Image: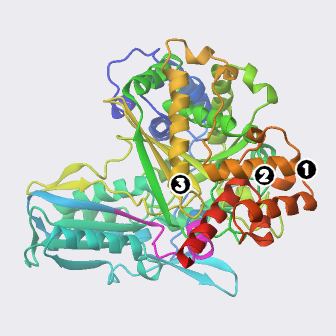
Amino acid sequence: TLYSDDKINNIDINTSFFSLGGNSLMLMKLHFEYGIKFNINSGSLVISELFRSPTIAEHAQFVEQSAKMKCSVDLWQPLYLNSAIASYAQEAVWLAERCFFPSTSLAIYNMFSIYRVSKGQLSIRIFLDATNAVVARHSLLRTQLFFDCDEGRLYQCILDPKVNSNLYSLEMSVTEKNIEEFIHWEEKTPIENDRIFRCHFIRVGHNDDGIMKPGDALILNFHHGSIDGRSMDLFMDELKFAYENLDKYVQQTLSDDHSLQYIDYAVHERVIKQDILFWLDNLKGYGWDRRLRLPYDVNFPKTGRRTGLGSAKITLVPESIAHAMFAYAKEHETTLYQLSLTCVYVFLVLLSPENLDACIGIVNHNRYRPELKKMLGMFVNILPCRISFADDIWDHSFEDILSEVRRKFIDVVEHSSIPYAEILKYHRVPNMYQQHPFLNMLFMIESSHDYNNVKEFNLSMDCQLKGEAHGSINVAKFDLILELDYDIETFEISLSWQYATDLFNPKTIDELDQLFHHLLAQLFESTANPFQRHLGTLEKFVIESTPLEKRLRVIFARALGIDNEIDIDMYNSFFFNCGATSLNAMQVIALIQRDICSTFTVEHFFSNLTVKRCASIIEQLLMEFAVID
């Protein structure tokens, strides 16, 4: 029955879970289910063993062995608090908003869903009553954050259930354009007073306060600091139940008055004994300010701050390659996630040999205890996944690299309950201020079946709602996010490059996308088995230079005494890292002033020490000169 929950029926017990379309997220859900169903302590049933041995028969053996340990689940108990310290996740997002994105005009961490009434009518009164009932049941939804300047700590306090002002509003819209303007307002407007969510009813072409008709829109906007994607699904499930069974839902709340709340979790997670030795060893020697060698177009802000402005490029993986990736993952009993993550690491090494030691951010849903499975709150944890390859990587097969990535990924997942903030505490370097130390790239993978909050569903017998897909493509929480989205039923795969416009130009992202597609084609388009292909046979990446960049390469090579300007990496060859002296620098500056741009200064050069960055500033100077002229 556990497997049928994941749409896997009538299967051989010796068939791999992953070969049937299971992914890492589904396996984590099974891990939670095993703990609850068989009353097993999460420490007794190690999730890494489920990854390594993914058949039903093997899982049954592990469950049986764990159950024989007679180690019952030591559940966390409610603490009945109205005020307590904020969770690590709440604290991280609160700090990010104020320290790293202080001047942005976007509400970076707003996370909203849009629903249209597609059939029937929605009673606003019943909907509000149902929402109030859910808010009363989950204290998180009426929690407010505040900073105690005397103690220097961030706290959360629970408001009275009756204090729901500012949570709801009724809006009148005449056209679809008005709705789009309102959605844009939601993207830009923070949720007031550090509250958790707000709800808007938008009526199109009528002002009936009592009902919403087909075409009317409902917007639920949550703050990501206290709510994650799974919690949004749980919220909608309870809202649907309360809308049709309000009395029964209220009675359940009264009888379940001693349930664990998110504020309890925030306290428990602070005192839990955590084994940090893995992370001490895993990140040893990886510099606090070390960055992946990516083709940045501009300099890093020295303060670590960003505007939060971003954009995205989405492309579809060719059908033949997508089918091949699914087939190879199934054949080798691995997940599409692990296969794709391996491709990303290979991609980084092909971009620059300095990426042989690379750290990528990965997302973990982090509901690692049975009592957290259905709790509303923010649990998602960002983890640094570091993999260091030897210089002889080119002599190894893709299968070798996959095995190493898989081993390291499973190790990281096994220690994933330790919050990112705690990991940093043991690696912090004094006087070094970074937004996401170790991480300037995040890799994610999403299945069309992972979340259901954008699907069509019946709110009641009389009302049907349909979620509208949308994306905040104007927001960038990281320098670069590569997200792979797939559909197990259609075998479609798409790539989404979400990037900070502070740091990347669209042309550079286009080039990265083309190169990644080219890598996938080399690995999966040929008839040969990609797992046996040696990395040394892959084509090295060559990013096409503009005429200006070519001229600058020649100048750099001349000053450095390099015969072939092609040896100058226009993105990552920092001038003084190539053995240059100050005299060499003055030669470069003089040649640029004489041959390319007379307004180029010493300050311009010393602030932009690569070919790419010099080219970017020179283009700006030439444009300014053209305007003046």
Front residue of 367/526: it is 526
Residue drawn at x 55%, y 43% is 512
Front label number (3 vs 1): 1
What is the secondary structure assignment of the residue under circle 2?
Answer: helix
Q: Give the percent coordinates (x, y) of residue 152.
A: 69, 81
- Left or right: residue 592 compared with residue 615: right
Q: Is residue 137 above or below residue 419?
A: below
Instruction: Read off the residue under disc 1.
Output: 579
Q: Amino acid at mark 3?
A: Val
Question: If the image is split into quadrants, where does the C terminus sit?
Answer: bottom right
Residue drawn at x 44%, y 49% is 313
Front residue of 49/512: it is 512
Q: Give the percent coordinates (x, y) of residue 433.
A: 74, 68
Residue drawn at x 35%, y 83% is 163
What is the secondary structure assignment of the residue under circle 3?
Answer: loop
The quarter of the displayed image where residue 252 is located:
bottom left
Front residue of 615/452: it is 615
Instruction: Read off the residue under disc 2.
Output: 555
Q: CA distance from mark 3 to mark 2?
A: 48 Å
Q: Give the percent coordinates (x, y) of residue 20.
A: 41, 23
Give, as a single range, the part of the protein colored magenta: 92-112
Instruction: Read off the residue under disc 3.
Output: 380
- Left or right: residue 104 compared with residue 197: right
Is any atom of residue 411 visible in this view? no
